[in-house]
Amino acid sequence: MVRKFYDVVQRVSVFLSKWPKIVLALLIQLLGLAILALGVFFAPYFFSPPYSSWALVLVQAVLSVLISRWIGLPVWWLVIQFLLPIGLYAGLALAFNPVWALLLFAVLWLLFRNALTERVPLYLTNSTTRQALKKLTKSLTETQEDVRFMDLGCGLGGNVVFMSQQRGVAQATGVETAPIPYALSKLYSKIGGGEIFAQDIWKTDLSEYNLVYAFLSPEPMPKLWKKVSSEMPKGSLFVTNSFAVPDIEPSDIWQLSDGRETVLYLYQI
Ligand SMILES: C[S@@+](CC[C@H](N)C(=O)[O-])C[C@H]1O[C@@H](n2cnc3c(N)ncnc32)[C@H](O)[C@@H]1O
């Protein structure tokens, strides 16, 4: 009996783990609310009402965290699940104008759009890693004519501008679809050099580039490998910061000595 129950629970959590996290998080909040409502219905048999609104909100927050943990949401979602009901209630209690929340959401979306759709947020390559890219450029120019560099998801454009200023780099290009990073990187490249396009990684033709760099997340790596290995020219180099391609042996691994302990995975095509 216990075994069967455990199996059902396992199957439900495997099934749910395939849903988008944001949908799951909202459903979990609703489930937490339903359990809370049930609790409030039966509570008068044990404690006499009224109940403090803050205590109820806190119970809702804890219930949501417990269910989220059971479903297997990542740790940072547990924090969101805890803060969401508290934030909503605080907003109501303080008569917070919802237009501000909408504005905040709009800015976050314009900045981190790809965190929702591609599960790739915005974080930036540091200067130690850029120096490693410079070193790679040098070694590539020893064997090839010139470097044509592409940053897939170029963020604020720092890598593209940096690479455009290196000797032996004939072309430094980046693609970006999050609106604010795109606008800033476009402006930066106008001043500093290189070219930025408002283009999806998946629609970018890589056959022109012999050094392609990606700093994304574990999520797109298997699909990205299919793309780079079929499109990039023979002898070219694909470099991924921190997130290796699963089940593919890199040609080389560079462990950098920065605070983040950055690891670069190099794949010779
Ligand atoms: C972790 S950041 C890296 C930024 C930059 N390459 C760097 O190393 O400093 C990843 C960037 O990829 C962008 N991105 C994610 N998926 C994308 C897609 N399908 N098309 C274009 N850009 C994308 C994100 O918006 C984000 O700016």
Image (cartoon, rainbow, N blue to C red):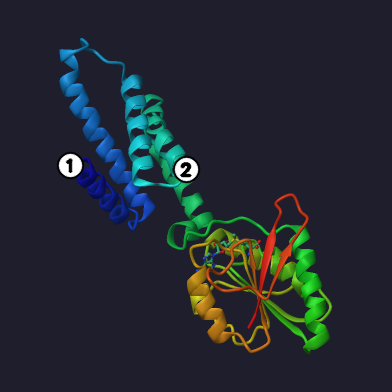
Mark 1, other Cα within 10 Å: few <14 / some 14–19 / many ≥20: few
Q: Is residue 206 above or below residue 108?
A: below
Element marked by disc 2: helix
Q: Which residue in the protein does label 2 denote? A: 75
Identity of the amino acid at label 2? Val
The percent coordinates of residue 159 (x first, y second) are 71, 66
- Direction from residue 46 to residue 117 in the image, left or right: right
The percent coordinates of residue 68 (x first, y second) are 36, 41
Residue 183 occupies quadrant: bottom right
* Residue shown at the point (34%, 58%) measured from the top left: 18
Along the polypeptide, which appears first: circle 1 or circle 2? 1
Element marked by disc 1: loop
* Residue shown at the point (34%, 46%) measured from the top left: 71
Q: Which residue in the protein does label 1 denote? A: 1
Cα distance in 3D space between marks 1 and 2: 31 Å
Q: Is residue 15 above or below residue 57?
A: below
Looking at the image, in which quadrant does ligand 1 appear?
A: bottom right
The percent coordinates of residue 76 (x first, y second) are 48, 43
Q: Nearer the viewer, residue 30 or 9?
A: 9
Q: State whether residue 165 appears in this view.
A: no
Which residue ends up furthest to the top in the rendered image?
A: 48
The percent coordinates of residue 200 (x first, y second) are 51, 73
